[in-house]
Amino acid sequence: MKKSILIAVLAVTLIISFSLVSLAAENWGNINWKQFAGTKLNVIVTEMPVSQVYKAKLGEFEELTGIKVNYQLFEDTDRRKKQIVDFSSGMGEFDIGNIGHSNREEFASYLEPLEKYLDDPKLTDKTWYNFADYPPDVIAAGYSKAGDLVYIPYTAEYYLIWYLKDVFDQLGLKAPQTWDEYVQVTKALDDARKAGKITAYAYIDRVLPGASEAGWSYSCSASRQGLILVNYDTMTSYVNTPKGIEFMDWYTSWAKNYGPPGSSNWTWPDIAQAFGQSQLAMCIGGNASYVTIEDPTKSKVAGHIGYAHPLMKDGGRDPLWEWGWGMNAASKNKEAAWLFIEWLTSPTLMDAIGPEYGCPARASTYESPAYVKAMPSQEFIDAQVWMMTQGVDPRPQVISAKWAESLDVISKDLSNVIAGIKDAKKACADAEAALEKLGYKAAE
Amino acid sequence: MKKLTADRRFVHSLVIPIAIIVVLVGFLPIFYSFNLSLTDFSLIVRSSKYIGFANYIRLLTDPRYIHALVFTLVFALVATGIELLVGFVLAYVLADKSVSSRYSSAMRTLMMVPYIVAPVAVSYTYKSLIYDPNSGYLNYFLKLFHLAPFIIFNGRWNAIIAVLVMEIILRTPFITLILYAGISAVPDSILEAAEIDGAGIMQRIFKVIIPFISPVLVVAFIFRYMDAIKMFDEIYVLTKGGPGIITENVSVYASAQSFEFFHAAYAAASTFIFFIVVMIIINVFLKVGKFGTE
């Protein structure tokens, strides 16, 4: 009797063990993950919340594959410098790095095209990997202008309008749904502050000079209003056109009229911090930043934030921002590096970690109950999905190797308007003159 | 003779490794950078070719670079001049025999605090805790006295003044310490003799102390000036060179050209022109200060 019980227990244990093993294999597709065991990969990554989420999971990859990962985090500007120096030198110190969408063309010629790894059954179980899960606009951004898939996205980031619900409730305002409402709500917030009903300033956007500061925000804002500032294919500047001047005037007027005094040298973290301290009633911020502003240890307004998609006019759309994983073309461990990229961007991992960073690149994650539960509100998810499906331009003009220099030039003159040194007309004329020196021609 | 050779060998064995390191990390990069500056090399373009001095010619006709060059040299001159003046006054007071040595020592230690903190940290402190119109102390006090707030990006001068004031507060202690050592070394007998001869305080300063410590003054000025023209963190954090390009110096310009726009060769040429201009200026300072000629 005892012997039969023992055999039964053993049998059940074995069945459960085999089931778990097969379940694990199923979760990670049908390839041999151990084929490059013993390899060491060097990865260069921007220090940001999503990178920490990945970092916490690296042990699981090492256990699954036997590949050792040296995961090095740097502040983003340093990451970009180190990465371009290494990738362009052909030294191959780093096998993999994160690539920002706007920097894609800077890196494109040094990145390994990834289609062949995707199509290799030894390396990728295509059924499990489900490449089609990427929304078309999101994956389109991973293709270089030369047509190669140079990175696989892991975040899909959009600007959202953040607003303080309590302030809106107090004033009887609703999140704007049209451009006109957007203008009216901003004005109403400003009037309320001036009348002493609220202390928060109405609105802010970035005006600090620099391509990654005001330059990027300004071009995104222009894109939302259907204006292309610079066409990099034809090297044409539209900065000094009537619409360009009108836009410069609008952007700087809003910053001066509705933003806190002295916010002209604020970086993005400064703005997020001010919003978190309820100094701002409304601003345009990235969806990925919800991790910080909804953290009650860092933000006084956590749990009291409303979200809406940014408003567009004249057929405008927002440039998509995303982070993707790209492989150094000079890497000496390309196949192992692909396994790592495949794992990082797999549906299995993204489902598991999507709820922790909020803006996964795969569509299926947005339907996962765990994700829905973890997000701050349904309003947040709805705004994201609206942007993902209707609000972004996956191949915006701004994605060019020349974007940084041109937007830096424009942002410099923008800050001159903010400081009262020039008016919008003079600033646009001067910015265009500077662009002409860089080889751009003025639009007729 | 044999001993001398052994001594020489010993000396060489100490010097040669250092000389090799200096060549490897000092001279080779300079030659490499110069070579780079003669090409059209960009970090985001795979091929490059020699273009002679085209980068240099372009730079000398680039108004943004010329502005950065002039701003760097003039700003450093003004900052160093003010620091020298303030530093001298402070050093004179601290070295005065009537001031308690305990008080003098405590003051010297306290003055070093801003100097020993990393410039980037001090810059963030100034940006958020002093200059910020909403949470900064400066504007808090201005408001108390019903004065208009100080906003960095307001007009042409505010950003320059903001950087200058921070730089002076941050760096004057260095000058003070050097000059304190110099003034303390002036023999009491000379000062007493001047006093007996009827020299007032200004005469003692201009006729006795300054001539006596002039080599120290020149060294302090040159060290500080060389440091000021390299300034990066303060401008990068506080203004990013703005508004417009008003506070953009050569370091900020070259950094943007190299690591934001990836024009590595152009950036290398910009630093070489700067290097030559600085060498000329330092030479002039040394000659004017008659340093090392007597």
Image (cartoon, rainbow, N blue to C red):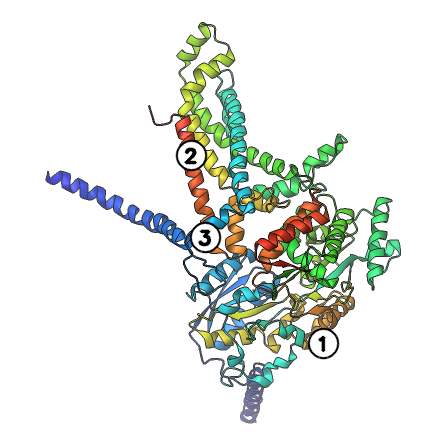
From this view, report whether residue B40 is shown above or below residue A69: above
Which secondary structure lies at badge 1?
helix
Question: Mark 1 and mark 2 in contact (Cβ < 8 Å)?
Answer: no
**Near-viewer residue (A154 or A263):** A263
Q: Kindly identify the residue that appears in the image at 50 percent across and 54 percent down.
A: B258
Q: CA distance from mark 3 to mark 1?
A: 57 Å
Residue A386, how many percent across, how many down?
75, 70
Residue located beneath label 1 in the image: A367
Residue located beneath label 2 in the image: B282
- What is the chain identity of the residue bearing mark 1? A
Q: Nearer the viewer, mark 3 or mark 1?
A: 3
**Near-viewer residue (A96 or B272):** B272
Q: Nearer the viewer, mark 3 or mark 2?
A: 3
Q: Can you name the residue that lies furthest to the left here?
A: B1
Asked whether, in this view, residue B87 is left or right of residue A397, the answer is left
**Near-viewer residue (B44 or A383):** B44
Residue A132, how many percent across, how many down?
64, 81
Q: CA distance from mark 3 to mark 2?
A: 27 Å
Circle 3 residues within 10 Å: few <14, some 14–19, many ≥20: some
Task: Please state which amino acid type lies under the numbered disc 3.
Answer: Ala
